[in-house]
Image: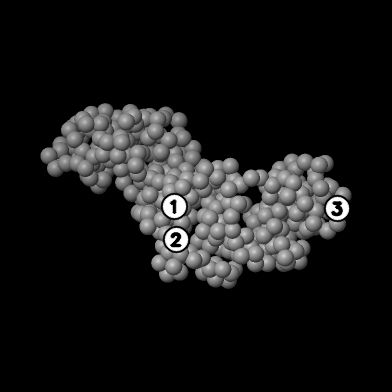
């Protein structure tokens, strides 16, 4: 029996019951594929359900404002996906009358849709014979055929796509693509795969050569940058606080945060105390006019909420985060209360802090 037939038979017996597998609607498939980029299925599924409940068609998603989209996306990470998702929904709704392109080449023209996502939509929605190539596919094919090509190299995707296309039954592209991704996710896993129960244990080259733990080859390692964030959680006599929007390009673009002091290393009480008695309050519009001439006296107390930094790991950055509670006398101009605070989209680490510390 051929590789493809064995793979598809395994899939039909072992596939997970996932909501986006019950439809060929390109909107729903596009939504799921964008969400599952850099995200585990278990984490992404509740977000898919939430989005499809709030935005059942591309028109509802297009009509939403960006903050609504970011709020629903909160905690899923890689927020550029959400911003691109929203822009693409608006383009499809207005320029394409709500109809997604029906082929791989035209799908690639959509913002935020790369080769993998275009192939997934084209095959799952329109049964176009185009292979998907993601980490699961790299792993399955490299192990089964003992392919030592560095998957970080420029030529790797083309090589593996050609191999997958050769193996793909041209009358069952969607089924084959689903099967090989599922096999990589459930059976041919990155670490310690259970090769003893694998349906390919008599034909897998990596198993025969005892190389399963060496494949796929990936030589490039991501350099991680450490950053040190100190958030000023200000409260006034009315228990109101203030936040700001991250408008600069980079992490968490267009999400909200407390006023931020970014430092070169972990800093303690003395550094922060000296800093907040400088111009930082004025720069962030924290004090009304009648306090600007007497800024140091406006600060009633400063306390460190978490003496040990919270380490929030992103793919390319490790953020060492401290929250500093700053009590000020009087009232903050344009301050917001706890209930209003919770309506804004925040990075998950700040959201978790707010849920714990701000009671409504």
Q: In the image, what residue occupies the spot 75% across and 54% down?
A: 8
Residue 114, labelled with which disc? none
Image check: 202 left or right of 75?
Answer: right
Query: What whole-number distance in Å separates the C-alpha atoms at marks 1 and 2?
Result: 11 Å
Disc 1 element: loop
Residue 203, labelled with which disc? 3
Q: In the image, what residue occupies the spot 74% across and 41% down?
A: 192
Residue 32 visible: yes
Query: What whole-number distance in Å separates the C-alpha atoms at marks 2 and 3?
Result: 45 Å
Q: Which residue corresponds to mark 2?
A: 89
Q: Quadrant of residue 336?
A: top left
Q: Which residue corresponds to mark 1?
A: 55
Residue 175, placed above or below residue 19: below
Q: In the image, what residue occupies the spot 61% across and 47% down?
A: 18
Tell me residue 210's x, y (percent).
Answer: 83, 47
Q: In the image, what residue occupies the spot 40% across and 46% down?
A: 71
Foreground of the two, 308 or 117: 117
Tell me residue 341's x, y (percent).
Answer: 32, 39
Label 2–label 3 contact, CB within 8 A: no
């Amino acid at each position: 029996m051929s590789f493809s037939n064995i793979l598809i038979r395994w899939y039909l017996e072992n596939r997970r019951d996932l909501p986006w597998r019950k439809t060929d609607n390109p909107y729903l498939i596009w939504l799921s594929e964008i969400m599952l980029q850099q995200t585990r299925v278990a984490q992404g599924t509740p977000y898919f359900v939430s989005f499809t409940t709030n935005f059942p068609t591309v028109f509802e998603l297009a009509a939403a404002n960006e903050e609504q989209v970011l709020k629903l996306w909160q905690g899923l990470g890689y927020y550029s996906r959400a911003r691109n998702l929203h822009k693409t929904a608006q383009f499809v709704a207005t320029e394409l009358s709500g109809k997604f392109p029906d082929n791989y080449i035209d799908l690639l023209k959509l913002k935020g849709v790369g080769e993998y996502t275009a192939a997934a939509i084209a095959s799952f929605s329109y049964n176009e014979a185009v292979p998907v190539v993601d980490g699961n596919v790299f792993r399955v094919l490299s192990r089964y055929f003992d392919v030592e090509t560095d998957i970080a190299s420029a030529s790797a995707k083309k090589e593996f796509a050609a191999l997958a296309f050769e193996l793909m039954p041209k009358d069952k592209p969607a089924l084959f693509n689903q099967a090989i991704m599922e096999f990589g996710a459930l059976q041919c896993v990155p670490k310690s795969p259970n090769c003893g129960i694998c349906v390919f244990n008599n034909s897998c080259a990596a198993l025969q050569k005892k190389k399963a733990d060496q494949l796929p080859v990936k030589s490039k390692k991501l350099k991680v940058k450490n950053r040190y964030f100190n958030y000023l959680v200000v409260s006034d006599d009315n228990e109101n606080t203030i936040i700001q929007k991250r408008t600069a390009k980079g992490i968490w673009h267009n999400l909200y945060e407390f006023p931020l002091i970014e430092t070169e290393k972990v800093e303690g009480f003395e550094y922060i105390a000296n800093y907040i008695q400088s111009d930082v309050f004025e720069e962030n519009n924290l004090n009304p006019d009648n306090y600007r001439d007497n800024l140091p006296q406006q600060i009633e107390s400063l306390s460190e909420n978490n003496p040990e930094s919270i380490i929030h790991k992103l793919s390319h950055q490790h953020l060492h985060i401290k929250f500093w509670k700053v009590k000020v006398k009087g009232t903050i101009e344009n301050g917001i209360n706890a209930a209003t605070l919770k309506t804004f989209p925040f990075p998950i680490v700040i959201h978790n802090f707010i849920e714990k510390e701000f009671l409504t």
